[in-house]
Image (spheres, rainbow, N blue to C red):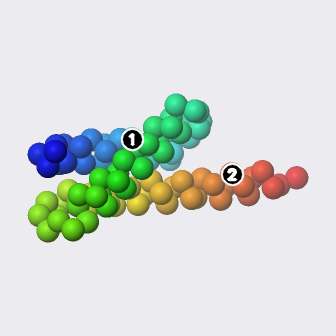
Amino acid sequence: MKKMLNPISILLFIIHFFILYLWLFEWEKLYTAPWLWGWGISTLGGGVIYFTHYKKSTDHIVYKKLLLSSTFTMVAIAVLSFLVDSTVDSMP
């Protein structure tokens, strides 16, 4: 499993980057059920991998920081999306 962590981290980073692209430029496509599920699963997967395998590890610093930053970005844009959506819904 340890050998697969680096490719999985890179794959999650690529997925997170693509979701960020969709969030910035093509948000209509992102707000469909399959994309929202993918967004949630990739964010949850990034968090689980970081906290179970990378948090206590002192090696693979680059992959560790890459995964943590991309997962944190996904959480941040999810919170921003929730705030924007709730603000727009509260407008008359």
Residue 34 image offset from top left, x and y in percent: 52, 31
The amino acid sitting under disc 2 is Asp
Q: Report the residue at 54% width, 54% height from top.
A: 78
Can residue 32 be seen here? The reply is yes
Residue 88's disc is none
Residues packed near mark 1 inside 10 Å, few (<14), some (14 to 19) or many (20 plus): few
Residue 51 image offset from top left, x and y in percent: 31, 61
Residue 69 image offset from top left, x and y in percent: 34, 61
Q: Report the residue at 40% width, 44% height from top.
A: 42
Name the residue beneath numbered marker 2.
Answer: 85
28 over 67 or under it: above or below: above
Q: Which residue is more in the foreground, 1 or 31? A: 1
Secondary-structure class at tag 1: helix
Q: Report the residue at 44% width, 42% height from top.
A: 41
Secondary-structure class at tag 2: helix
Can residue 26 be seen here? The reply is no
